[in-house]
Amino acid sequence: MTKRRDISIKVPVLARVEGEGALDIEVRDGKIEELKLRIFEPPRLFEKFLEGRSYGEVADIVARICGICPVAYQMSAVHAIEQVFECDPGPWVREMRRLLYCGEWLESHGLHVHLLALPDFFGFNSVAEMAKKFPDEVKRGLALQGIGNEIVRFLGGRSVHPVGVRIGGFYKAPAAAEAVALVEKVRQQLKHAEALLRWSAALDLPDSSQEFVSVSTRHTDEYPMNEGHIVSDAGLDLSIDKFESHFKEQQAPHSTALHCHLDGRPYLVGPLARLNLNHDLLPDAVKSLLRDCGIAFPNQNMFHSIIARSVEIYYGLFEAARILENYIVPDLPYVDVSPKAGIGFGCTEAPRGLLWHRYELDADGRIVQATIVPPTSQNQARIEEDLHNELLTFGLEHDDAALRLRAEMVIRNYDPCISCSTHFLDLRIKRS
Amino acid sequence: MIKVANTSAKPKIAVHKFSSCDGCQLALLNLGEPLLTLANLVDIIHFAEAGPVEPDAKVDIAFVEGSITTPDELHRIQRVRANSRYLITIGACATAGGIQALRNNANASDWMAAIYAQPDFIETLDTSTAIAEHVRVDFELWGCPISSQQIVAVVRVLLFGVAPLQEHDSLCLECKRQGNVCVLVTGQKPCMGPVTQTGCGALCPKFGRACYACYGPKENANPDSLSERFQGFGLLPDEIADKFLLINNAAPVFAAAGQKAKENKHD
């Protein structure tokens, strides 16, 4: 006699992940027959309404794709367009873009770790609740998020949809006195970042390593942000214009989000992937702190992505301090550009991972065609694979509530930014 | 309006998200320690990105981010309205349809087909519309994004039991107060400041660049006059249209000005 049980749970569980989702799992004879993470992302059609717009507007338009990582969208776009215009903005602009990116990593990672991931990890409903039990840790986290916002404001005027970036550089160079004031604040936060790193390294995280391929950019002599090749730990090494020869974006029928595969397989982008592939490029001071905390890379445990974010928070501050210490006011914060027709590529490291842009421009510098591949669409297939493995390891015999909690934790490791709608995961488990 | 202060010991607040980038919710999430203070003054009942999830709870104030772009959102906004004493839109998407309203004048289904292999799986409307086109809105916070000061100020005055004041002045007034060099008159750049409402802190002129109108139209804006000025700078009709048809392209004054500029092309 067969016992059959169909369970359908409709509860809002995935708060603190951007995007509206549902997880459908079909279990038969103790095995997962089917697992689908369905994402309902109201399409906003940016790639289409970019068409016909002038190059000068692109940085302001693409910023609006994501309020949490507008800098990433601006950076991939300006690099792509400057490639078409054969424009090199020079070392000052290069350093300031790196500083701006440090700010965004700090802001985004600080937000994720303290407002989104840790409250869940400890079972609090919100950061405000967590602050009652862990006041110092929460204040420390808000301060780290805050310094990130301040760095973005330094170059962009505001932290969400900053206005400082233009093709060829920046609209304005901050005064030297502002840099002096900021570097002092950045240095003060280093001790907070170190405390966070030690604290996150000591968290009792699940021990669950999986096999997966990490993908990130890699630069010859610095931890990657704006420039580099695309590499994987399976030996891939591509220039960014060859992205489409190995990476294919497809629409999964169960989702509005496009899924991207590397040679037909899921892969990981983001902080853990970046560290797996580039930990050797961290400054010696950061390396020795990691050794001291007992943190080593490569690391195949996705639950350690919170540690990876803490490492990048520390590194982001360290790098921001270095850049600010050497700050000088340039004669002009940008170089003039002259539009021309062509195709350009931009590939930079958004807080959540590789963000690839391709633009075709006409002779006046108007967009003919745009393609944008955000990190979340790249991680989507990996999240499903991870859920499949992790829930099997965890044990399907657990009740639905326990499975749901585990699934939430798994998904949150990827900090998915599915910009976005409301934030519910309906977990539907069908057992037979 | 008003009198939230007397409704309960601690007013209940919800933050709802529709089609948007999440940037306006960051006006709260980026507050730092004041966020903890705020959480002591009000009960944040629903704010999915920050944790609490209770979308159908009755609340005193509902903040709504994002525009209406899907059939589901059409229904959801009605529930939000029914459950909320005061509904306040935050940002350009909720208040004017957002940048994604650029689809409204295009063939949205063609656009869908160009991006998605199976557009049929995606339920979406042909338009992106402001919340006020669907339900009564009690107060609007303009901006792309709104600032922390705007949202904190509105909560504060509601706690005091006072109606919030909407600043409709043009950006130019703020710019003059700051003593910025005028990018339009002196810099000969196509600045949208004269038709744009204040609130951002005149960031772009402060950076020496032309305002791109992310705070929407000011009260009694005169876009015709500004369009003529832009024409004098040598901007082509399409370029003038693009100035109006950007972040707040579906705000009626800007939509009309953009349309008019395009028609000039055919004269």
Image (cartoon, coloured by chain):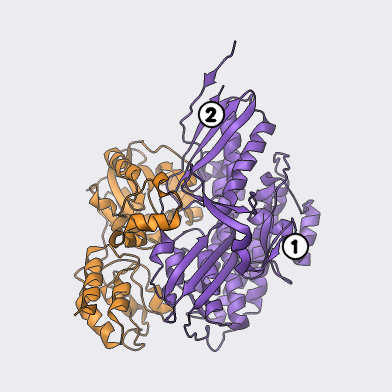
Q: Residue at x 62, y 31 (%)?
A: A32
Q: Check whether the beta carbons of the residues at disc 2 and disc 1 lie within 8 A of each other.
A: no
When the figure is inspected, residue A169 is found, relative to residue B56, above or below; the finding is: below
Colour used to depict chain B in the structure image: orange
Residue in front for this viewpoint, B263 or B199? B263
Tell me where residue A36 appears, x and y as whole percent. Answer: 54, 38
Q: Is residue A414 visible?
A: yes
Residue A71: numbered disc: none
Q: Quadrant of the C terminus of chain A?
A: top right
Q: Earlier in the sequence, mark 2 or mark 1?
A: 1
Callout 2: chain:
A
Q: Which residue is mark 2?
A: A429
Q: In terms of secondary structure, where does tag 1 sit?
A: helix
Q: Nearer the viewer, residue A41 or A178?
A: A41
Instruction: Tell which chain the image draws in purple.
Output: A
Q: Which residue is mark 1?
A: A286
